[in-house]
Image (cartoon, grey):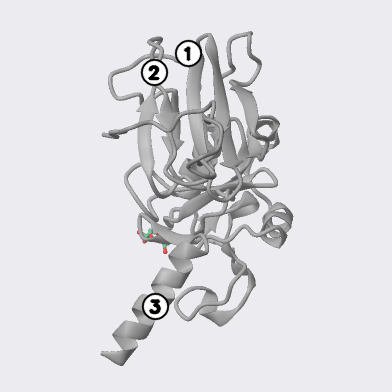
Amino acid sequence: MIALALLLVALQWDLASGWGYKNGVLHNSIWLEQAAGVYHRESRSGKYQLTYKEAKAVCQYEGGQLATYQQMEEARKIGFHVCAAGWMAKGRVGYPIVKATFNCGFGKTGIIDYGHRLNKSERWDAYCYNPHAKECGGVLTEQKRIIKSPGYPEEYENEQICYWHIRLNYGQRVHIRFLEFDVEDDTSCLSDYLEIYDSYDDIHGLLDRYCGDELPEDVFSTGNVMTLKFLSDSSVTAGGFQIEYVAVSPPTEPDDTKQTTEMPETITYT
Ligand SMILES: *[C@@H]1O[C@H](CO)[C@@H](O)[C@H](O)[C@H]1NC(C)=O
């Protein structure tokens, strides 16, 4: 019982500080799905499903290649932590550990290295390196800003992956307004899409996934952070998007002059 309670406390602490599980994989969720151009990918059918050849194809599909050990270590140094072994360049397998835990990385930190695998049919995840993808996205802290798809107003390119992490002052909220929107349309938005998360990562709080050319409604965060993720696949592009975000500050005193920005009465997310 005590052990369970301690585990729960530890779990709460982890979630509060930006660590969490996604599909059973422990991530450091702080904007670091992609760090220094390195990011983690698993098969669409789940964890540990990719042969070496398939892992290479996954990275190439997104315009990158398998990360080298050195690139992994550079990413790890700035906080890239994923508790799942994946293919790297030259058939090496390993994963980056920043924070020592019992059940991940044998209590060590560093690149946990399984070495160059002789059997390339083994199934692991993949670690990709895509320097081009770094040209979009970033951490945004301004009170107001326009976010554009890569290359806008030109059509966006294939194989882009961008993360914009908005972080405002404590107590503020993020108000998102779509100014222009045109992303390759398909029924489930599987090819190209924009996702908005009501959190500082792309693990918690998915609000919606967008594609097509209808202008979506405004979106508000519940806290002072929000994440936008844009992904385009290897075929068919479209006009792209311009999205504005504005910080919404809470009313200070009841008697103060009226705030120019209004808080929404009710917001329903589905
Ligand atoms: C290589 O790995 C695959 C998948 O784990 C396994 O099915 C196969 O038997 C292995 N081959 C050899 C030669 O060990």
Res. 146 in view: yes
Considering only vertical position in the picture, is 227 above or below 63?
Answer: below
- Depth check, front residue: 129 or 10: 10
Q: Quadrant of the C terminus?
A: top left
Q: Name, please, the residue furthest toward the bottom.
A: 2
Q: Amino acid at mark 3?
A: Val
The reply to whether callout 1 and callout 2 are in contact (CB within 8 Å) is yes
**Sequence-wise, which precedes: disc 3 or disc 2?**
3
The residue shown at (67%, 56%) is 72
Q: Secondary structure at mark 2?
A: loop
Considering only vertical position in the picture, is 68 above or below 133?
Answer: below
Q: Amino acid at mark 1?
A: Phe
Q: Quadrant of the N terminus?
A: bottom left
Q: Is residue 189 left or right of residue 113?
A: left
Q: Position of residue 99 (x, y in %)?
A: 59, 72
Q: Position of residue 193 (x, y in %)?
A: 43, 25
The residue shown at (59%, 54%) is 91
Residue named by callout 3: 9
Residue named by callout 1: 181
Residue named by callout 2: 216
Q: Crowding near pointer 3: few (<14 within 10 Å), some, many (20+)?
A: few
Q: Secondary structure at mark 1?
A: strand
Q: Is residue 268 left or right of residue 62?
A: left
Q: Amino acid at mark 2?
A: Pro
